[in-house]
Image (spheres, helix red, strand yellow):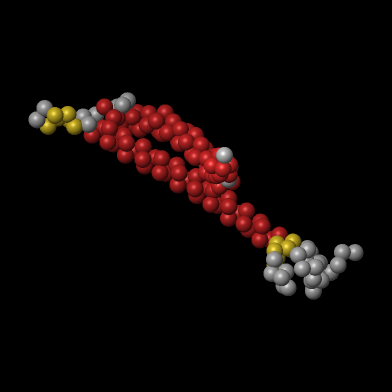
Amino acid sequence: MGWLADFKAFALKGNLLDLAVAFILGVAFAAVVTSLVNDIFMPIIGAIIGDEDLSARTFSISGVAIGYGAFLAALLNFVIIALVLFWIVRVATRLQRQQEVVEEATLKDCPYCRTEIPIAAVRCPNCTSQLEGVAAPA
């Protein structure tokens, strides 16, 4: 039964669970983005170029059909998905930077132990040093 305990320890590790959740969310997100591209953007592009189904466009060379429309549809899907992901990452990065600025504004380093403490602290909770230049609360 040692292998069962080892497998349980492996399967229930925090990193593995985090990875599984991220994978499932990624699959769900991919479905949303694919639907956005296929159900919203591609019909708009089809209306603009005057063809409802871009992927059906072909031409023939010596009786052989070349389906350039399918390639163009796949290329457009890629470009649109890349743009949507770029915008999402850009917004997430900006939000993360704003959060870091807020955190920086509320914390300072203890001059003695160099751990982060609240700006208003008069005594370090980590090393218990009295902080100089900070007035004690009245």
- Residue 9 position, x and y percent, is 58, 44
Residue 17 showing in the rendered view: no
Front-most of residues 9 and 112: 9
Front-most of residues 129 and 74: 129
- When the figure is inspected, residue 80 is found, relative to residue 103, above or below; the finding is above
* Residue in view at x 66 percent, y 61 percent: 104
The furthest residue to the top: 52
- Residue 14 position, x and y percent, is 59, 46
In the picture, measured across the screen, residue 107 lies left or right of residue 25, that is right
The furthest residue to the right: 138
- When the figure is inspected, residue 61 is found, relative to residue 78, above or below; the finding is above
Check the picture and name the quadrant holding the C terminus. bottom right
Check the picture and name the quadrant holding the N terminus. top right
In the picture, measured across the screen, residue 97 lies left or right of residue 130, that is left
* Residue in view at x 36 percent, y 42 percent: 79
* Residue in view at x 26 percent, y 32 percent: 69
* Residue in view at x 40 percent, y 44 percent: 82
In the picture, measured across the screen, residue 73 lies left or right of residue 94, that is left
The furthest residue to the left: 62
